């Protein structure tokens, strides 16, 4: 398999220094290995994605000196592939519909043990499995989200699950990372894989697309390290290969806060307008 990396931005705002770091790191890793570098536009959330941000992404990345293969895969064109994956998981009995509101979840999560803080996972509060006990209807309900039944899914998977980390997680995790079933049940839980109106969640789409594009190394920020546990479970359930992961440090502002899409002050476009060069950007992010 050809060594293949990717950069997968969502066109929901301007690219900032953190994105530049991630894209340059992915392209540098591919070049060093004589491999392929792919760009994927993660625009499944059509309520937030905008064509002008997508154009700005192409423009900023080209200015940084990056080249990538065409055509570019866009998630908005991949809905049938996500639906096929969801249908398969549904048929295997590994999904269930959930109609709980955020408020229901917060109330249920804190109810059983007064004074004990509810646990947070990669997607917020660990779901207290309220709807897991309702028998599944013949087909998914139109007004419900679909959750992974983690406990049931794990029954068919080896314990622990493993993946290779060539970068570092937030606590220095590197090398062969093992994830026990007990941890997956308590610290990840029954995450949402399909939302009403939105179709597939980020977790499902990213797993299906990394496999479809034969990505062998996923470079991305350490903020996504814990989400890798979800991706690993989905790869195993769907019979897809697990790539290696390379989680990298996050670019922070002078107060130590991670840059977000709204940090327009650090948008690549603004540095460009100020006359900075791609070499200046590399220096700013420590490359
Ligand atoms: N689309 C995600 C983002 O912009 C990145 C997903 C990934 O690299 O796995 O944060």
Image (tube, helix red, strand yellow):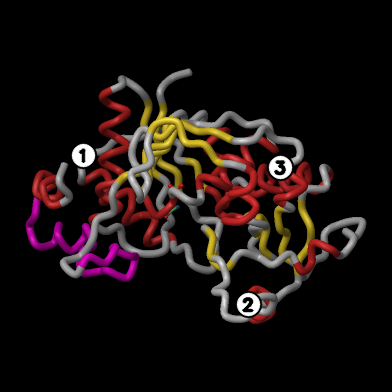
Closest to the observer, 193 or 62: 193
Q: Which residue is mark 2?
A: 110
| Extent of the magenta region | 256-277
Q: Position of residue 18 (x, y in %)?
A: 27, 54
Label number found at residue 154? 3
Residue 8 located left or right of residue 59: right
Q: CA distance from mark 2 to mark 3?
A: 25 Å
Q: CA distance from mark 3 to mark 1?
A: 44 Å
Whether residue 201 is in magenta: the answer is: no
Q: Which residue is mark 1?
A: 65
67 w.r.t. 284: above or below: above
- Circle nearer the N terminus (3, 1): 1
167 w.r.t. 14: above or below: above
Q: Position of residue 126 (x, y in %)?
A: 61, 64
Whether residue 264 is in magenta: the answer is: yes
Image quadrant holding the C terminus, namely: top left
Residue 284 located left or right of residue 244: left
* Residue appearing at x 31%, y 20% in the figure: 34
Q: Position of residue 205 (x, y in %)?
A: 58, 48
């Amino acid at each position: 398999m050809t060594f293949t990396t990717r950069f997968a931005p969502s066109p929901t705002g301007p690219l900032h220094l953190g994105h530049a770091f991630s894209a340059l790191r992915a392209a540098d890793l591919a070049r060093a290995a004589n491999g392929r570098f792919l760009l994927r536009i993660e625009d499944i959330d059509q309520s937030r994605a905008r064509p002008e941000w997508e154009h700005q992404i192409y423009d900023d990345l080209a200015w940084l000196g990056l080249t990538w293969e065409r055509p570019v895969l866009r998630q908005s064109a991949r809905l049938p592939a996500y639906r096929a994956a969801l249908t398969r998981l549904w048929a295997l009995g590994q999904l269930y519909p959930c109609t709980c509101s955020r408020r229901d979840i917060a109330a249920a999560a804190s109810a059983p043990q007064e004074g004990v803080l509810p646990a947070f996972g990669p997607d917020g509060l660990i779901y207290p499995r309220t709807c897991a006990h309702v028998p599944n209807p013949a087909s998914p309900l139109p007004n419900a989200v679909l959750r992974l039944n983690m406990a049931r899914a794990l029954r068919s998977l080896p314990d622990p699950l493993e993946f290779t980390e060539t970068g570092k997680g937030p606590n220095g995790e590197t090398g062969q990372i093992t994830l026990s079933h007990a941890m997956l049940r308590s610290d990840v839980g029954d995450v949402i894989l399909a939302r009403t109106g939105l179709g597939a969640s980020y977790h499902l789409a990213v797993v299906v697309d990394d496999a479809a594009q034969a990505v062998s190394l996923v470079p991305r920020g350490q903020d996504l390290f814990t989400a890798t546990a979800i991706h690993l479970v989905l790869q195993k359930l769907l019979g897809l290969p697990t790539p290696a992961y390379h989680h990298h440090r996050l670019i922070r502002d002078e107060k130590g806060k991670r840059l977000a899409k709204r940090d327009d002050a650090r948008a690549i476009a603004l540095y460009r307008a100020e006359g900075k060069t791609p070499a200046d950007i590399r220096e700013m992010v420590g490359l």
